[in-house]
Amino acid sequence: MFIAHVALHLGLCSAMKSKPPEAPIAIHVKLVNLGRETAFNQSFTVQRGYDRQLVVEFDTTRGTYHMTVEAPQYHCTASDWLALAPDTVRNVNEELAPGLPKPTKPMIVFGLLPLSFGSAHPVMQLFDRDKNGCDKPITEPLPSHIDSETDSDAYYAWLYSDPGLDPV
């Protein structure tokens, strides 16, 4: 079993910012895999401190997960899709906000990078397969919503569907 380490950096919601630095804040983190099984479910208590972020760290197995983060006493949440490559350290940034988020489900592409690519930042683009090929010049990329991240040893890309585009 391959383990990934997650350092979850949480931006404070407005209700938390007004609390004193010594205030304890309860954070609940849940990861659900694509088979809808709970893979991680843990509560943390952290001190608010002077920083604009809270940090919680945990280890879990590699995979693709829907992550929900809650600070129940402040009614603040965050929700996102998370990919974890084996034997990596992920620094994940999320903003806690009032209410319940409604994330869309992206297609996630991720993999390991060789050490020689440590300073490279790969970019994911989508191209029309009918207009690009081995014997054709590369055309402009298709309009798309792609978020990407690069760690020292891995890359991650979230491809979101555009409701304005017709399915192929």
Image (tube, grey):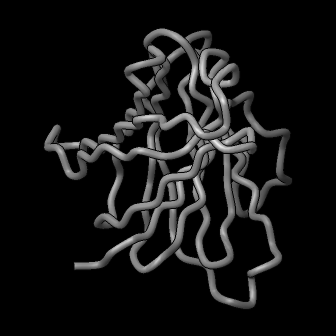
Residue at coordinates 69% horizontally, 30% vertically from top-left? 144
Q: Residue 101, can we see it?
A: no
* Spot occupied by residue 53 in the image (x, y as percentages of width and height): 67, 42
* Quadrant for the N terminus in the image: bottom left
Residue 68, compared with residue 85, is above or below; it is above
Task: Please name whichever residue, 26 or 146, is drawn nearer the observer in this view of the structure.
Answer: 26
Residue 57 drawn at (x, y percent): 46, 60
Residue 131: horizontal and vertical position, in percent? 72, 41
When the figure is inspected, residue 69 is found, relative to residue 134, above or below; the finding is: above
Query: In this view of the protein, can residue 67 be seen by the observer?
Result: yes
Residue at the image point whose x is 74% and y is 43% from the top: 50
Q: Is 25 placed left or right of 29 in the picture?
A: right
Drawn side of residue 35 relative to residue 156, left or right: left
Front residue of this view, candidates 86 and 26: 26
The vertical placement of 83 against 74, above or below, is below
Name the residue furthest bottom: 116
Q: Is residue 154 above or below residue 145?
A: below
On screen, residue 118 versus residue 25, left or right, reads: right
Which is nearer the eye, 160 or 65?
65
Label tally: 0
Which residue does the image show at 41% across and 19% down from the upper left?
A: 73
- Determine which quarter of the picture holds residue 17: top right
**In percent of the image, x 60 and y 48: which residue is there?**
9
Q: Nearer the viewer, residue 56 or 34?
A: 56
Q: Quadrant of residue 58?
A: bottom left
- Measured as percent of width and height from the top left, residue 77 is found at 47, 23
